[in-house]
Image (spheres, rainbow, N blue to C red):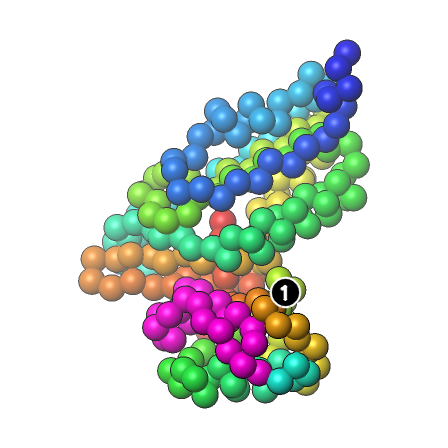
């Protein structure tokens, strides 16, 4: 079970900021994204412009294999605009 | 001489209150430094012909602070003579002309602090998880920095 955090446009599309999700311990970043989209289909529109942050490290959507621990933070990161 | 004067410090703050240039400058001033360089990011009142009412910022706070710490670490590697670094970013509503971000760097001579400030703001825009929403009269828009490598730059 991981904590999924939603920010900016992704929070608007998902309708929430934070939830727990049950996912396999080992999963590719793309598959993890797909699980999240299953729960919140409106997120599909931003798929090309989003990265994840797993344990506060950026991860591109793709084949990268993640090894998740219970309670890990996974954040949905739309294009940033700080500064 | 106090030993604490020699220790370079990073001052990182994300807060919803109005930012103060005086406060941020004072954090980095040092008797060993002849230069303090500053960058202030302020809110423009227009974008593509639309009137901007105000900006709203949100952040993945814990990761944003970590990413800013990484930027400070990189600055010290590239410009070892840099003494103190302060990065203050405002969150929540920021009215027009008020500052959203203030970066201050002190160094013995001016070249390093000037270059370090530019590096800080450019890298912040590329890597720190903070988002800006521009509020117009009829609508709003989540902005995307061109430095952000995962944004689609259609414009």
Q: Position of residue B12 (x, y in %)?
A: 57, 40
Q: Is residue A67 left or right of residue B17?
A: right
Query: Does A59 sit above or below residue B96?
Result: below
Does the rendering let one see residue A52? no
Q: Residue at x 29, y 56 (%)?
A: B135
Q: Chain of mark 1?
A: A
Q: Can you name the residue that lies furthest to the top here?
A: B1
Q: Is residue A14 left or right of residue B104?
A: left
Query: Does B22 sit above or below residue A51?
Result: above
Q: Position of residue B25 (x, y in %)?
A: 55, 26
Q: Position of residue A77 (x, y in %)?
A: 51, 68
Query: Mark 1 sits on what residue?
Result: A55
Question: Helix, strand, or loop for circle 1?
Answer: loop
Query: Does A51 sit above or below residue B94?
Result: below
Name the quadrant of the N terminus of chain A: bottom right
Q: Residue at x 34, y 57 (%)?
A: B134
Q: Is residue B138 left or right of residue B40?
A: left
Within-10-Å neighbours for mark 1: few <14, some 14–19, many 20+:
some
Number of numbered discs visible in the structure rendering? 1
Q: Which residues are magenta?
A: A1-23
Query: Does A81 sit above or below residue A62?
Result: above
Residue A19 is inside the magenta segment: yes
Does the rendering let one see residue A70? yes
**Quadrant of the image occupied by residue A58:** bottom right
Q: Residue at x 62, y 80 (%)?
A: A29
Residue B131 is inside the magenta segment: no
Q: Residue at x 20, y 62 (%)?
A: B138
**Quadrant of the image occupied by residue A32:** bottom right
């Amino acid at each position: 079970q991981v904590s999924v955090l939603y920010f900016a446009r992704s929070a608007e599309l998902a309708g929430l900021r934070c939830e727990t999700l049950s996912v396999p311990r080992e999963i590719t970043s793309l598959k993890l994204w797909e699980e999240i989209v299953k729960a919140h289909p409106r997120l599909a529109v931003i798929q090309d412009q989003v990265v994840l942050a797993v344990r506060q490290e950026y991860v591109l959507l793709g084949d990268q294999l993640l090894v998740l621990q219970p309670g890990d933070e996974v954040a949905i990161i739309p294009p940033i605009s700080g500064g | 001489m106090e030993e604490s004067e020699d220790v370079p410090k990073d001052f990182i703050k994300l807060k919803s209150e109005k930012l103060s240039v005086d406060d941020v400058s004072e954090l980095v001033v040092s008797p060993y430094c002849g230069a303090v360089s500053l960058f202030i990011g302020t809110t423009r009142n227009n974008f593509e012909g639309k009137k901007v009412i105000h900006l709203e910022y949100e952040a993945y706070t814990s990761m944003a602070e970590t990413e800013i710490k990484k930027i400070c670490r990189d600055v010290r590697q590239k410009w070892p003579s840099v003494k103190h670094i302060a990065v203050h970013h405002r969150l929540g509503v920021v009215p027009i002309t008020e500052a959203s971000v203030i970066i201050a760097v002190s160094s013995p001579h001016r070249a390093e602090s000037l270059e370090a400030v530019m590096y800080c703001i450019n890298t912040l825009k590329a890597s720190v998880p903070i988002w800006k929403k521009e509020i117009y009269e009829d609508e709003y828009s989540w902005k995307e920095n061109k430095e952000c490598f995962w944004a689609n730059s259609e414009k």
